[in-house]
Image (cartoon, rainbow, N blue to C red):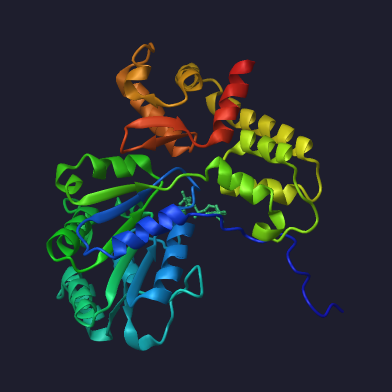
Amino acid sequence: MKEKNEPYRKDVAFINREKELAFLKGCLNERPESILFIHGPKSSGKTTLLYKFLEQIQREQKVDIKFMDLRKTFTNVYEDFLKTFFQVEDTGEKKESRASNINIGFFKIDASVEKKIMEKRADPFKVMEAELLDLTRKGIKPILIIDELQALEKIYLDNDKERQLITALFNFFVAMTKQAHLAHIIIASSDGYFLNTVYIDSRLKKCSTFYKVDYLAKEDVMEWLLNLEKYSKIKDYTLTEADAEKIWDTVGGSMWEIQNILGKLFEQSIDQILTAYKKEMRGIIAHYTEFDKNKELVLEVVNKKGIVSGTDFGVLPIEIRELKELLRDMVKNNILYFDPTEAVYYPQGKSYHLGIREYFKK
Ligand SMILES: Nc1ncnc2c1ncn2[C@@H]1O[C@H](COP(=O)(O)OP(=O)(O)OP(=O)(O)O)[C@@H](O)[C@H]1O
Ligand SMILES: [Mg+2]
């Protein structure tokens, strides 16, 4: 019988992010004045960065962290939102957090307040405000983070279709930041379209800061790949500079894809892996455009230009309405990323760009 589990042959790396961490820390040292929106392509490391930031800041300052990860929680109706944000204090239950070394809390209420909220005799926003005020008075900085806020898009206050929960939440966030300076509020999302509705909303524009978290820069990728033992605890193989360049040319700074390739390198050669990868990415595009000439036309423009804005598609023989739908679909399927601050589209990472290029080689 085995005594112990074998150690993993590769560890999860965390590369650089000095600039991003310094930015977040800088925000925390200012009085809260606006809502901070963290955006960036799919899997660009937004959530990981936030956890790292919290871990560091918790060691240095008196903070109270409330982290709502809406991807993990099932939020369908108003009651789900209440259950996600509030926790009845005397149950002794602990909510699960992704990193066990971070002390993550929720709005704490006792059973009688919960009952009142559920029966609509107490306003949940007032309850949240009271706790933030209490923490601030005690010299503790409250930080409220909501990951994947767009998950609440279809929830209505008291299930009344006229009153969107998200609008009420934004009003509350503006009141807590710009007006009362009570809490740091950070919202992360990779849904560029959702963020765009926020970005162009004139009431919110003056009360929000947008910060982009992108894939790693080339120098970071090279540093990682040339020091695998240091960053990923890989002892079984090393990579040459030429190997690292090849990986960069295929997936760029997309950490998730790099980790994936590093995993395969235990069994296969780099050229085998990257050739298969290229084929796979081409296949994704071929599969996506199958039987749809218009999708092909749109991607052809993306292939030529790399970064495109709406007007670049003006030359295409596609009705505006259909074009908008196509672009939305491409963003939803993570083929393209839409950057709300610049109103531009580009392939979701280098590997998608490669797939598009390969597809049009024919
Ligand atoms: N600085 C980093 N160095 C190395 N790997 C990282 C780094 N940041 C994130 N990763 C890895 O990249 C992957 C994606 O990270 P994460 O889930 O934080 O991205 P995200 O931007 O929040 O994604 P989504 O768009 O799906 O919300 C994870 O496997 C994570 O371990
Ligand atoms: Mg995330």
Residue 164 visible in the displayed image: yes
* Residue shown at the point (14%, 66%) measured from the top left: 180
Residue at 56%, 55% (x, y): give it: 15
- Pinpoint residue 198: horizontal percent, then vertical percent: 25, 45
> Does 9 sit above or below residue 122?
above
Q: Nearer the viewer, residue 9 or 239?
A: 239
Residue 222: horizontal and vertical position, in percent?
Answer: 63, 44
Residue extending farthest right: 1
Most foreground residue, 314 or 217: 217
Residue at x-position 71% and y-position 36%: 274
Q: Vertically, is 198 above or below 31?
A: above
The residue furthest left is 179
Label tally = 0
Task: Pick whichever, 228 or 12, lies toward us.
Answer: 228
The spot of residue 179 in percent (x, y) is: 12, 61
Closer to the camera in the image, 28 or 255: 28
Answer with the quarter of the image where residue 218 lies.
top right
Where is 256 relative to 30, above or below? above
The answer to whether 201 appears left or right of 44 in the picture is left
In terms of image quadrants, where is residue 361? top right
Q: Quadrant of the N terminus?
A: bottom right
Q: On the rendered structure, is 279 left or right of 146?
A: right
Quadrant placement of the C terminus: top right
Q: At which x and y percent is residue 282?
A: 63, 28
Residue 257 seen in this snapshot: no
On screen, residue 156 versus residue 179, left or right, reads right
| On screen, residue 1 above or below 143 | below
